[in-house]
Image (tube, coloured by chain):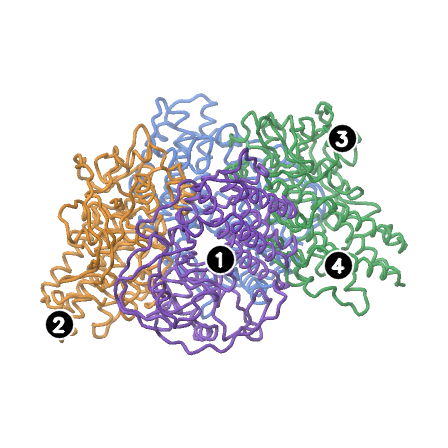
Chain colours: A green, B purple, C orange, D blue
Amino acid sequence: MNVQTETIHLLLPHQSLTRYLAVRAHTLTLAAPLSEEDCAAQSMPDASPVKWHLAHTTWFFETFILERYEANFQPHHPAFRVLFNSYYNGVGDKHARAQRGLLTRPPFDEVLAYRRVVDARIQTLLSQTWSASQQAEINSLLELGLQHEQQHQELILTDVLHLFSRNPLKPAYAATPYAMADLPPALEWLSFDSGVVQVGHEGGGFCFDNEVPRHRQFVEAYALATRLVTNREYLAFVEAGGYEDPALWLSEGWDWVQTQQAAHPLYWQHDRGWHAFTLHGLRPLDLNAALTHVSYFEADAYARWSGARLPTEAEWEHAAQSSVELTQLLGTCWQWTSSSYAAYPGYQTAAGALGEYNGKFMSNQYVLRGSSCVTPVGHARISYRNFFPSSARWQFSGIRLAR
Amino acid sequence: MNVQTETIHLLLPHQSLTRYLAVRAHTLTLAAPLSEEDCAAQSMPDASPVKWHLAHTTWFFETFILERYEANFQPHHPAFRVLFNSYYNGVGDKHARAQRGLLTRPPFDEVLAYRRVVDARIQTLLSQTWSASQQAEINSLLELGLQHEQQHQELILTDVLHLFSRNPLKPAYAATPYAMADLPPALEWLSFDSGVVQVGHEGGGFCFDNEVPRHRQFVEAYALATRLVTNREYLAFVEAGGYEDPALWLSEGWDWVQTQQAAHPLYWQHDRGWHAFTLHGLRPLDLNAALTHVSYFEADAYARWSGARLPTEAEWEHAAQSSVELTQLLGTCWQWTSSSYAAYPGYQTAAGALGEYNGKFMSNQYVLRGSSCVTPVGHARISYRNFFPSSARWQFSGIRLAR
Amino acid sequence: MNVQTETIHLLLPHQSLTRYLAVRAHTLTLAAPLSEEDCAAQSMPDASPVKWHLAHTTWFFETFILERYEANFQPHHPAFRVLFNSYYNGVGDKHARAQRGLLTRPPFDEVLAYRRVVDARIQTLLSQTWSASQQAEINSLLELGLQHEQQHQELILTDVLHLFSRNPLKPAYAATPYAMADLPPALEWLSFDSGVVQVGHEGGGFCFDNEVPRHRQFVEAYALATRLVTNREYLAFVEAGGYEDPALWLSEGWDWVQTQQAAHPLYWQHDRGWHAFTLHGLRPLDLNAALTHVSYFEADAYARWSGARLPTEAEWEHAAQSSVELTQLLGTCWQWTSSSYAAYPGYQTAAGALGEYNGKFMSNQYVLRGSSCVTPVGHARISYRNFFPSSARWQFSGIRLAR
Amino acid sequence: MNVQTETIHLLLPHQSLTRYLAVRAHTLTLAAPLSEEDCAAQSMPDASPVKWHLAHTTWFFETFILERYEANFQPHHPAFRVLFNSYYNGVGDKHARAQRGLLTRPPFDEVLAYRRVVDARIQTLLSQTWSASQQAEINSLLELGLQHEQQHQELILTDVLHLFSRNPLKPAYAATPYAMADLPPALEWLSFDSGVVQVGHEGGGFCFDNEVPRHRQFVEAYALATRLVTNREYLAFVEAGGYEDPALWLSEGWDWVQTQQAAHPLYWQHDRGWHAFTLHGLRPLDLNAALTHVSYFEADAYARWSGARLPTEAEWEHAAQSSVELTQLLGTCWQWTSSSYAAYPGYQTAAGALGEYNGKFMSNQYVLRGSSCVTPVGHARISYRNFFPSSARWQFSGIRLAR
């Protein structure tokens, strides 16, 4: 990964190691409430088994750090290079994505052992003496691997939620009580003047390659909603027949509604009142809470119905940089923008397989900004660009309106 | 199930129980080499997870015996009625077949507990006093449930074989050594005269409803091969370009070859010599062993190539009844016949949901006769009618030629 | 084609030619009410454009007669060998079946010219002097070609009916008035004893290879309905909820009902009363007329609902040979039997590509007996074996009950 | 359509009529080389039969002008409202797009009559006296209908090209000789400074609603190729293994390559040298000519391989406005941009069904700029925004590089 800052480069090895061990441990904490069976299943091609996430994140450190820096590198297991490669053509063959749920072997315990072994080898590597440039590159790759693991921490939760939602027993992932949201403030509009704005990551700290170069964009005057759309507001759209009126939908969106027979957000169901399936199991729909688990098509249709529109990512980022009056920017849910995922002017991919991390996905996906309630602490940034196809809705994706 | 004999009806309760416990225990023995993960995965819609087999066979006893005979019957778990119903519309809703692999809950241990509880309730039931007709019906249903469980014992092994075959690690189910077959005797032809023959089950002992009524059929003079086709013989077909010549195939079969890009039996692979994936893992192809894992289309094409044909089920059964010169009738592999699976004259289905056991599958499937190396001991019969679609080949299915 | 009788072999050339010209002319008569556009369209992969039928039947004579017997044979057009080959792998490549509707070239007039040229060349061939064996084989092939053309005459009408049924303008093929059927007699049952019966073609006249050898079958005692099921009778099944009760259907049939959302025969529709789309356009449902356009699944379900079953083809043929009390055997509609399409004992296919005519389709299809209202006069026989997949219903297919 | 200029509003009726009749006549000229069969066939869901284009463009005038302005409006044929509605949900039901090829009725002649009748009714309408505002709106709608018809004029040619490409006879649409291209000048790069630029239509003359509002965008410094990529240049990419190297492709693009087994542009074929299928039939590949018929994925991969990139639409339009040094902007082929098709800031759709003309397609499509060799004379504009999905390549779509 080509974008690392001085701050990261100058980390002392023991600081890196402490962070490494903390992030790695958190992944296991997330898997702790799950059985081995839970960890092995794959509920759809877009989702992956938890065991696969545990192994793939480890494969990332093995492939991009150990293989480059360990003297006399030997792979932990020769088959793992293929089994746990997600999408890096530059690394070689990959196990078919839709068949990750068939990998009952290696067993769960062997994947945990794989994690322990790679952790120990990373620890050894970090204890060695490196030139300044080597140390900087190791630090960069280590941080990239940790950010990558944090992305998969979020996916572990969204994928388990999807798996459990398909189970008629409606199991709960979380044992903790479910807290209902407070009544949100009225939705207000915050206005911004037209002009040339700066977009993209700057300053210290990590970012992904798709967040730079920081560059100029011209935005016309606009206003942004100070908070997210709530379940109550979206329910009004549902009950007003929003899913039955083609005039509200993009042409593709209307096809999607009919093919999917979509009539409400992914995890809503109507059975003696509206309920939503959550990590806490099936719960009465929390009307005050922010709407989540809608597709781009639903977000776009709702915005049109309400006389507004979705923001562009430049509008979102400029507002987020400059205003403290906006709430729910981070930590509630990802927010669909109307911006197709594309390269910033001057974007450069890294050489080799790591160049496949972000760049090759820059077509037919839409950018989501912010972060969600399941994004790991410390992983979010204002300049962060998440992206999913317009039909995806198993992520915690919601709506902030613009006009 | 409508076909039970006096022998079964007169079993003493403790005899029934002994047999019940033995069959039930054997199922767990088959699952013993597998991890919980292995038991939860489903490799294709036709196959089921082992855990599902363990639960479904238990559901069968609960639904068709306990629910009818237990005073104040309460279901073990209300959701199980749907989750573990295979295809009985008369019982109500069913969990979607292709999504059995998503049922990470109930966990494996709960399914084992389900088995124990139902076993105990069956034991209690059998210890009670019943009228003669009640006792006879209970015995009949119990035997049907055990025969049903034995069918699933075979499926457990064929489904695990398929699951493991999809795993790049090529795991072995069986720890025991693999014994290579001895050189088989030369293939000879045993001739039978034309005439009216009797087909169908007769005499004491259990049979399924599709094996009766015993009835008359006229067969023209024919000859049957004294043994099964071997891997060596089939390899000659492969190497002679059998999969490339449309003249050898049924029209549907040729479409199947091209769609599947079929070039050899299901578990064969060519990589520095021919190998076959087996319950013992990947092994060099045993040329002397009987060919297995071919579809009806392959069986038909091989027969045509070799100047012979497949037998009808009447031919197979008549020969099996009357000759001791035929080998490998039972216990090696199922043998495709050219007979489409259909009702015998006068066939009657049972009333209620049990009438769905066999009859509703009587279209577009072909009958296989004999039994296989993974059929439970004591489960096979000369009159047994197994049936699968013409493209199925994950069973131990092979070829006996006729002419 | 291997089955020709002395009668055919001894035809004088001018008798052959007269018949040839009459059959060929009738095909054009059938196309006369259609526009060039009507003749070019293909409404589904199972159906073919009329223009294609006109060309393919011509290709048959060119390929199997002219190419064999003409001195210095030159193809009429080199591309036609591929374009108008239906399914004969032995002749070489074929144009993709589902894309016959894209062949706007050659234009309609060129296909008519192709017919004229081949007719003239056939006429020349027949005027030449041949040895007795050559003359016999030419006569055989000519008759096969004419029978083949008659099969396509029926398909022209069933395919046009399907095409027009998909057109919202509901055009009528036939200009003649539509005559409503008279009230049929009460359905009675004609009984037959058990015993060995003879099945298969015998005596003079043409038959297809799949109708021989005539052979013995044993049939148990049975009874056959003296007439076909009427629309009125089938409507009672529809209105009794026949399409909503899985207990009435084969498992595959129930899947078909749900996938197709089938709720009535193919061309019925309910819109201010029941109507049926016919070659005369959309008409009020003729309750007295024989039911047509049902699949095997529907025929089987109706039979089960009415407490009867479908006959086997041996039952049908034996009854048809021996009784004058049965009505509607020929000329009303094809009658589904419960017999899967399979080879008669001793069946031999012809050598070469003509061996593909019938034999390679002997899997997963069901035999229909009789003939229909659109079968050409003189084409039907008691021993005739028509066959279609169990889901097909664009033919004039109906039900005669047995028990 | 909401965007019309004063120029159009002030046209005298006879000027409007002259233009109307000229555009309408040109459509028939394009159909003249085709048979009725050619005009009825549909080669893929994206393409439409020529007859359907002839009728749909007429439907547009009938629905959006006659229905609004004619006193006592009566539809020409009640079924045509559904049959020839392309995608306007606001107008009501639509005939299924993929089944336009089944509409052998109404016959070709009736569609021509439909055109004549609507033309006459338009002529009558234009001869009447209207208020200034009515006259302005009629003129606007008339011009929109003519621009719409011109779009379909281009589609008639691209759709016929596709249809003929699927025909093994490889028919030629055009009787005129094919002129080989001259050697193009060397590719040079024209540079532009960074800054705020104006994008969108301005000034007199017609434009579509998606070309406005004219607005500001910031572009970084860039350079644009002075001419298009040639077949010779693209052939080098093909021969260098461009279609075999995943590193050159977007992830979706690589999936597309593998699924389509794409190895060259749509109409190229290699058979004793490279050829291309054209409106003049199959021709030796014209190496000097501009590359056409590539998808967005191919355009993107070629650009990456050549060390460049695709331009954004702002870059393309700004350059086109300000430079005379660029060649092949219009009239050669549409040029893929890296801009996802989206609304300009402040974009408003028209009220009613005409609002569906452009806006509802603003997702998952990419903008192409310029115009092609089959775009009608006078239809092209620098601000014109054509758009197609990233996999489409039956249009005349090519590549202009940027960096």
Of circles 2 and 1, the one toward us is: 2
Is A359 located above or below residue D16 in the figure? below
Q: CA distance from mark 2 to mark 3?
A: 97 Å
Kindly indicate the quadrant of the structure image that contains residue B26: bottom right
Q: Amino acid at mark 4?
A: Tyr
- Establish whether labels 1 and 3 are both on one chain: no
Of residues A150 and D365, which is closer to you in this image?
A150
Residue B14: % across, % down: 54, 49
Read off the residue under disc 1: D266
Q: Secondary structure at mark 3?
A: loop
Q: CA distance from mark 1 to mark 3?
A: 50 Å
Q: Secondary structure at mark 1?
A: loop
The image's mark for residue C128 is 2
Residue B117: % across, % down: 61, 43
Q: In the shown orientation, is residue A392 left or right of residue A223?
A: left
Q: In the shown orientation, is residue C16 left or right of residue A299?
A: left
Of residues B279 and D131, which is closer to you in this image?
B279
Q: Amino acid at mark 1?
A: Leu
Kindly indicate the quadrant of the structure image that contains residue C13: bottom left
The image's mark for residue A114 is 4
Q: CA distance from mark 2 to mark 1?
A: 51 Å
Q: CA distance from mark 2 to mark 4?
A: 85 Å
Looking at the image, which residue sits at the far top? Answer: D131
Read off the residue under disc 3: A326
Chain containing mark 3: A
- Establish whether labels 2 and 3 are both on one chain: no
Chain containing mark 1: D
Q: Which sits earlier in the primary sequence, circle 4 or circle 3?
A: 4
Q: Amino acid at mark 2?
A: Gln
The image's mark for residue B159 is none
Of circles 4 and 3, the one toward us is: 4
Q: Is residue A397 visible?
A: yes
